[in-house]
Image (tube, rainbow, N blue to C red):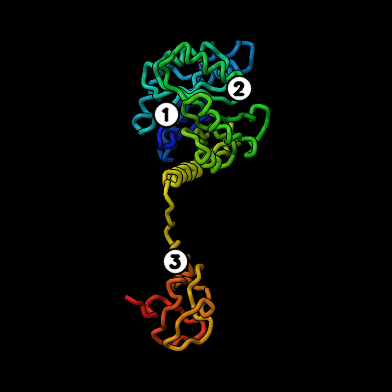
Amino acid sequence: MIGGDRTFVVVEEGQANLGDFEAALEMIRVASQTGADAIEFQLATAADFYIQEHRGYQIYKDREFSDAQLIELCNYAKQNRLELIVAPFSLHIVKVMSENGASAFNINGSDLTNPEILDAVAESGLPFFLSLILADEDEVDWAVKRIREKSPDAEFGLLLGQHTMASGGSGVLLNHTNLGYIETLKQRYGIPVGFIDHTPLEWTASLAVAAGAHIITKHIAISREKRGPDWKICLEPDEMKRCVINIREVESSLAEKEKVMAPGEDVDRSIMRRSIVAAKDLAAGTYLRREELVFRRPGTGLSPDKYEQLLGKKLRADFNKDDQITLRDVEIEE
């Protein structure tokens, strides 16, 4: 699932359901129509996520799903032909989802330095992503090293990305996306690398694919008007469809390793190229010299790079200035 020639596209639901299970199911239905490969849910059990005195505890308590609902999410994603990716903020979530049909985990960047989550996910046996948002290189090195030491057979990839919304930002600026680092990560760790797109743009993901990303995650919202979590960087369904189409078209372009003319380029070529034409009026029987040939548009005749094949050849007929001259117009010695 991770890596390969085809970009793995994940639609990130990002808690837009706000604890409404029917809304979560609706997000799956919408995501299944975008052309993406998977949907990601961020899931938590409040008791092992926040201290009870913090306001975040009650927020996540209100967003909890029962174990039965979590299992239904897995089943419903499969019914809609989507892989279910889970960003687990709790050990309980890791256990329930790994045992009941989740396809993979995504270790959220906020937990990259959390050995409990790292160990539990790596030991689950499921493939997973390691999000690098909020992390410096030393922290990434530490996390990758721990995973490899604790679970040497773990199948995982890295997700480059940035996160600026919690501090009140409107999404990551394009010049801060650090896309050139994707190849550095590949070389440094020798595993698939993807990109978490926290820009508000529908085409940044395509740039990441061109930069070498194997995996793309991008937030979706039924409507930004609802102002759910991360609404500023979410794409609405039609925008997400275009985002996925753009990714697939970039893949197609990258897969072609030989020079290929685009459809319609042959027409443009005949308009924009030049042809060999007579520099002046020429009589039949004239033996052509270089100064009697010039190169002018349109390019519907003999290409200028073939002019040497005409030199010294005798014209079969009279030609006026600017008439095209081709190999059919001269006598060719056998």
> Residue at 42% across / 47% down in the picture?
256
302 is higher (above) or lower (below) than 257: below
Quadrant (top left/top right/bottom left/bottom right) for the N terminus: top left
Q: Secondary structure at mark 3?
A: helix
* Number of the label disc, if any, that sits on residue 2: 1
Amino acid on which disc 3 is placed: Val
Amino acid on which disc 1 is placed: Ile
**Cα–Cα span, label 1 and label 3:** 41 Å
Q: Which residue does the numbered mark 3 point to in the structure image? A: 267
Residue 301: quarter of image:
bottom left
Of marks 1 and 3, the one in the foreground: 3
**Cα–Cα span, label 1 and label 2:** 22 Å
**Cα–Cα span, label 3 and label 2:** 51 Å
Of marks 1 and 2, the one in the foreground: 2
Q: Which residue does the numbered mark 2 point to in the structure image? A: 137
User: Is residue 229 shown left or right of residue 101?
Assistant: right
Quadrant (top left/top right/bottom left/bottom right) for the C terminus: bottom left
